[in-house]
Amino acid sequence: MSGKKTEILKYKAPDGNTIRFPVATIEGAQDGPHFVITAGIHGCEYPAIVSSIDFFKKTDPADVNGTITIVTVCSMDAFEQRSPFVSPADKVNPNRVFPGKADGTYTDVLVYHLFNDIIKGSDYHLDVHGGDLVEYLDPFSMYHKGSDETVNAKSKEMAEYYGFTNVIETYGDGAWPDKGTNYANSSEHGIPSAIVEAGNTGLLEPEFVELHVKGIENVLRHFGVLVGEADKPGAIRYYKDFKWLYSPIQGIYRRTVEVGAEVTEGQPLGVIENVFGDKLADVSANAAGRIVFLTANPSIADNGLLMGIAQS
Ligand SMILES: [Zn+2]
């Protein structure tokens, strides 16, 4: 029967606490695919979280073919305790440990249930991110290229129809940037998937919420889950990989570059200084491409993440 419902799914965490998933479901008036949307895997990415909520509120089941399952906040503990990127219980980033483990640490178990009880068996999966407390983003989408060409093609379409200019392909070679991620794991399990990123520094800026809602709706229209004609993607810049740049030492990053900048390999991007202003290290680009992710705040740990470069 068509309609909407909300529920909190609960699971026992290894530390004795309860893992909770707020799940909002839209049962469409017509038959169709099962589409899963996950938001808030990173609990401080508010444009992602709020856009999934807004989409649920505004969508009429009469306009839906099939079923849309939305987890509005996958990491409730991180959300409630304002913990960027990692679960407070074990300091693990959930988007590094998919498909999880039933008998692992808190985050392993969270991820295990999210995948096995909610995502697995669906037809499409979209993982919505963006704007954690310490990140500036130039909006981008990524999809995983695995061995199944049909899945690859649909994942790519998902990334394209979201409407962002920057589209990055990542590979399943067992290394970062996509090992253990939600979207790559879904793709490897035969579910077309993409990760989409927009937002800045823990802010709830309406323009990014609107971008996400628009992207979600367009992808759903493209795959026939939402009635109406999808907008064709505009001009897209395709990138062949995602290179992350880390600090060689702890200190203050005095950067000379902004998010969205195009850089060449080896280009100077600032220096790391100590707390007296002495230079400790130079920072230079480890790839040619576009800076789509930039750590906003200057206090950087040894081997701390400085930026992500979408490689041309
Ligand atoms: Zn994220």
Image (tube, helix red, strand yellow):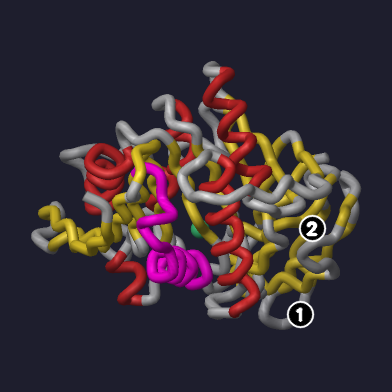
Query: Which label was assigned to residue 277?
Result: 1
Question: In the rendered structure, which amino acid carries the disc numbered 1?
Answer: Gly
Q: Percent from the top left, x then y, of residue 260?
A: 80, 61
Which residues are drawn in magenta? 45-66
The residue nearer to you, when weighing 63 against 199, is: 63
In reply to whether residue 46 is colored magenta, the answer given is yes
- Looking at mark 1, is its residue's CB closer than 8 Å to ligand 1? no
* 2 or 1: tag closer to the N-terminus: 1
* Element under disc 1: loop
Dot 2 surroundings within 10 Å: few (below 14), some, or many (20 or more)? Answer: many
Depth order, front residue of 195/210: 210
Which residue does the numbered mark 2 point to in the structure image?
283
Depicted 190 relative to depicted 248: above or below: above
Depth check, front residue: 80 or 56: 56
Q: Main secondary structure of the magenta part?
A: helix
**Around disc 1, counting alpha carbons within 10 Å, would you say few (fewer than 14), some (14 to 19), or many (20 or more)?**
few
Mark 2: amino acid: Val
Measuring from the top left, give residue 35's x and y in whole percent.
40, 43
Residue 43 magenta-drawn?
A: no
Q: Is residue 310 left or right of residue 222?
A: right
In the rendered image of this protein, does residue 92 appear above or below residue 124? Answer: below
Question: Which mark is nearer the camera, 2 or 1?
Answer: 2
Side (left or right) of 277 relative to 142: right
* Residue 215 relative to residue 266: left or right: left
